Image (tube, coloured by chain):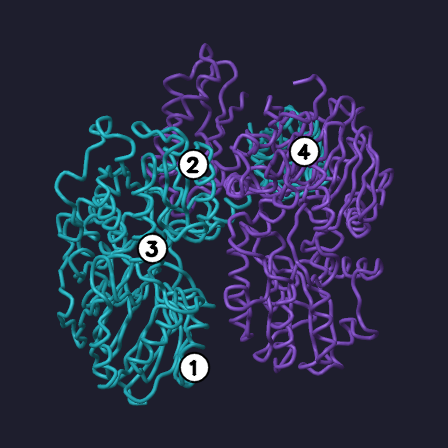
Chain colours: A cyan, B purple
Amino acid sequence: MPTRKLKIIPLGGLGEIGKNMMVMEYENDILIIDAGLMFPEEEMLGIDLVIPDISYLLERREKIRGIVITHGHEDHIGALPYLLPQLNVPVYSTKLTNGLISVKLKERKALVGAELNIVSPGDTITLGKFKVEFFPVCHSIPDAAGLIIHTPVGIVVHSGDFKLDYTPVVGKSTDLSRLAQLGAQGVLLLLSDSTYAELPGYTPSERVIGEALDNTMANAPGRVIVPTFSSLVSRIQQVIDSAAKYQRRIFIVGRSMSDTARMAQRLGYLKAPDGILCRLDELKNVPRNKVVFITTGSQGEPTSALVRIANRDHRHVRINRKDTVIISATPVPGNESLVARTIDSLFKQGAEVLYREVAQVHVHGHGSQEELKLLLNLVKPKFFMPIHGEYRHLNLHAKLAQSIGMTKENIFVQEDGDILELNSQAAKITGKITSGNVYVDGMSVGDIGSVVLRNRRMLARDGIVVVIITVNRQTGKLIGRPDIVSRGFVDTRESKDMLDNSCDVVAQVLDHSGNRTVEWSFTNTKVRDSLNKYYYEQTKRRPMILPFMVKV
Amino acid sequence: MPTRKLKIIPLGGLGEIGKNMMVMEYENDILIIDAGLMFPEEEMLGIDLVIPDISYLLERREKIRGIVITHGHEDHIGALPYLLPQLNVPVYSTKLTNGLISVKLKERKALVGAELNIVSPGDTITLGKFKVEFFPVCHSIPDAAGLIIHTPVGIVVHSGDFKLDYTPVVGKSTDLSRLAQLGAQGVLLLLSDSTYAELPGYTPSERVIGEALDNTMANAPGRVIVPTFSSLVSRIQQVIDSAAKYQRRIFIVGRSMSDTARMAQRLGYLKAPDGILCRLDELKNVPRNKVVFITTGSQGEPTSALVRIANRDHRHVRINRKDTVIISATPVPGNESLVARTIDSLFKQGAEVLYREVAQVHVHGHGSQEELKLLLNLVKPKFFMPIHGEYRHLNLHAKLAQSIGMTKENIFVQEDGDILELNSQAAKITGKITSGNVYVDGMSVGDIGSVVLRNRRMLARDGIVVVIITVNRQTGKLIGRPDIVSRGFVDTRESKDMLDNSCDVVAQVLDHSGNRTVEWSFTNTKVRDSLNKYYYEQTKRRPMILPFMVKV
């Protein structure tokens, strides 16, 4: 291999769903693609958000020419408020994406000083040695882009998140002609979305939902409530269109839903006939069978409008037996039980509930197997790297590529941090850099490490016992009885005797080792071990034990 | 209504999946159907198992004539080891079910003194005023039964967990003729399984899996590993049959899998050609393409054989690039991410992995919509009560019953604790008894209440801060600086200054209120409030704060 090589390094989004971030490096130029967040997994107790570790980038800050964003979903833009202040480089995206980024940055007070640039689909920008062309792709948010990156060693195509929808509701179809043209010209590397590599066939068009919506709007005897993602602008458009057809008025409920709808309307991505969108104070004047609510809460988020409605806890909206709820979204992995509970509560209120298991009320935003193969076929890359997905998705995507004739040696199933180096002839994985999760918890970013999380898991499982031991500073002898306080361990009234007896266990330990010549750390360990053993015998639980000595 | 009425009271299994338990009461006789457990939900931190609250039964112990068990799954027998010693009544079940109950009771040292009776399918037992006939149903475990209960007010049919499989692999088909006969005779009430009321059509026969198994056994270039449920005896039988066809030897890995297989073989529910089942020490003599492993771990349980294999942590079994894993099970709700991680790890080891998203390697054990309608059609009950399922499943099942002509007034969608009273003419819900969750955590049953769980949730989210304040017993004045210890809150090195400053916050509070006339509880509250405020300002976190005063 000649020395001048292109490096492709994923910092997030490979081997996991979320926190997508990709680095491209050639000599003195670095280009970043996307900067997303991930919602915490079950064992990341108390964590609010997860973002990529960018220590590699911080050491090379002067080389970074900019961040290019493919679309406005949280898993592609959500880390910007945290990372942009550290990196301080320009951001490039399409108009709606840019609107969503501004909203996010403003929320976290990171908008001032940010250099945000709008790029139109089809336009090309130059960032150091890279020329980046945005091409339209269809996804579950309008204004989504894929990227054609002209590099000194060849053309790299990044699919973004995409599906093929020849009849999209809002936005453009994926630009297959441009891709075919590139394929003919010669593409060095394709990076393509693997999220739904498990699904055979084609993802249906968003249009199919129109039918279910129309049916309900026409026939529902009461109000219609449609919870969905606020970023799913095309779905909101479909609800508006269908409501208009059946002379229903629309009430948008929930702050993030109203904010996004207003922004999308202002930028021209959402169109509503005059007078159809109403304020909640106009609700009482509209007959129940002429009302549609569009709300947040499709993920069963405890504080969302839908969940408050389902629990009869919403200030303005009450459900009754004639109402219909259409849950037009899929639970994000991890949210299944929250969503299921919300559906149950709605049924208990007497509502009719349509959800993905029982009706065609949602289609997802990613391409299925045949679409992935079609893209590979058109682009005909020399090398292929499946991106966006857990390891099995990347692996299945790699197999799809093999099934249409690519050789295994030209396919790179990477994990975050793996460095793929290429020139126009060859490619190989040459090493690994530091990458991983940075936790956001409350105000701070990155201070939570494995120790804090391990402690939280221990506390969550069996609680804590604090032991206060007062000893004479001179003699080292115990003064009075040790005090024991527990939280989250046992019912303190029912287990009063057991806890009392554990004081004796501590006293005994101190009797045997309680003199000045013995180190406190030694006594501490002995107290801990004895209590651990005693509690485990008595309860089969292992609370965290925190002995504390007061010398007087 | 005349005064003599039959009461049907669900104590578990309605509005949730699991801990199935149903009470039937007529005058001085109580009959219990099933006694299952439920695995804890995400927010039940540290809890091992959940069983039904039986306080209603404990108050009426002398009326209980026995417990009838429909089949040997955990969600129908799992509470027996905890409840049987309290109730001390006879248990009736079919042979395999009885074997599984014995194993469970023995594990928890509750077998001695238990009165376990075996009933053959088709047999009738008399329990007070109830005559209970066991009829065969097909489910994902052999020897499953439904119940025909002859009561003084009419016949009650309880479906158990069932599906219709006209070509079952092991065990019998659901006895439709007997049900049709009863339907002609007149059935007062049907209780029927709602678990898969969301699924249209028919559940496929277990036979369809044979094809996928045969294909793999014939063509896989290396070892074949099949993780599944140990109770899924028919699946184990299919693996044995398919392995035999292609001259592969079988190694059963994992304690619960071996125990169940041995018991099922002894009772005649599992048949293996001589010499096909091998011990692990014979493994080295068998070529890799002649080996099949049947293992536990289909739910991604961290200590299971499969997960240890996937993490290269198993003493005897290592995977390599030519091996194939067939995950022949569905993740139980809540286990999705554990299973996904296990699949990812297996792919990383280079194995080929077949799982339900990409291959027909599992069919579930419950009837789909058309089967549920068929049962309703045959049994033709006067009244109907959907059982076994979350609220939306019960609701959808009720709608299915309406769709085939039952009137809404004759269908009772109940929740746990609701009392349905019937005579031969009428039925209505007349009240509610105490019911709910009893938590098993370690050794103890039922001592964990809402306070302990709330504390665990609080500890899990933001950790704990313990404040030790030493004061002069006479003057009430602070001696030295307060001591602060935290766990699971912040990185204690990085946040040293912040924690140090919080000592000053405490000292200030004590300066202002630190004299003997002030109550400790008042000071305690003030310390807690001030630290709460300070920590929230500094970190946006709210750890549990535990102030502790030492008087010297």
Residue that badge 4 annotates: B188
How far is disc 2 from disc 1 in space, using C-alphas? 47 Å
The disc, 3 or 1, on the residue closer to the chain's N-terminal end is 3
Is residue A181 shown left or right of residue B285?
Answer: left
Residue that badge 1 annotates: A402
Query: Residues at marks 3 and 1, common chain?
Result: yes
- What's the residue type where badge 4 is placed? Leu
The disc, 2 or 1, on the residue closer to the chain's N-terminal end is 2
Q: Quadrant of the N terminus of chain A?
A: bottom left
Q: Are marks 3 and 4 in contact (CB under 8 Å)?
A: no
Front position in the image: B175 or A28: B175
Q: Secondary structure at mark 3?
A: loop
Query: Residues at marks 4 and 2, common chain?
Result: no
Residue that badge 3 annotates: A37
Mark seen at residue A514: none
Disc 2 packing (10 Å; few <14; some 14–19; many ≥20): many
Q: Secondary structure at mark 4?
A: strand
Is residue B319 shown left or right of residue A390?
Answer: right
Query: Residues at marks 3 and 4, common chain?
Result: no
Residue that badge 2 annotates: A346
Q: Are marks 4 and 2 in contact (CB under 8 Å)?
A: no
Is residue A241 shown left or right of residue B104?
Answer: left
Disc 1 packing (10 Å; few <14; some 14–19; many ≥20): some
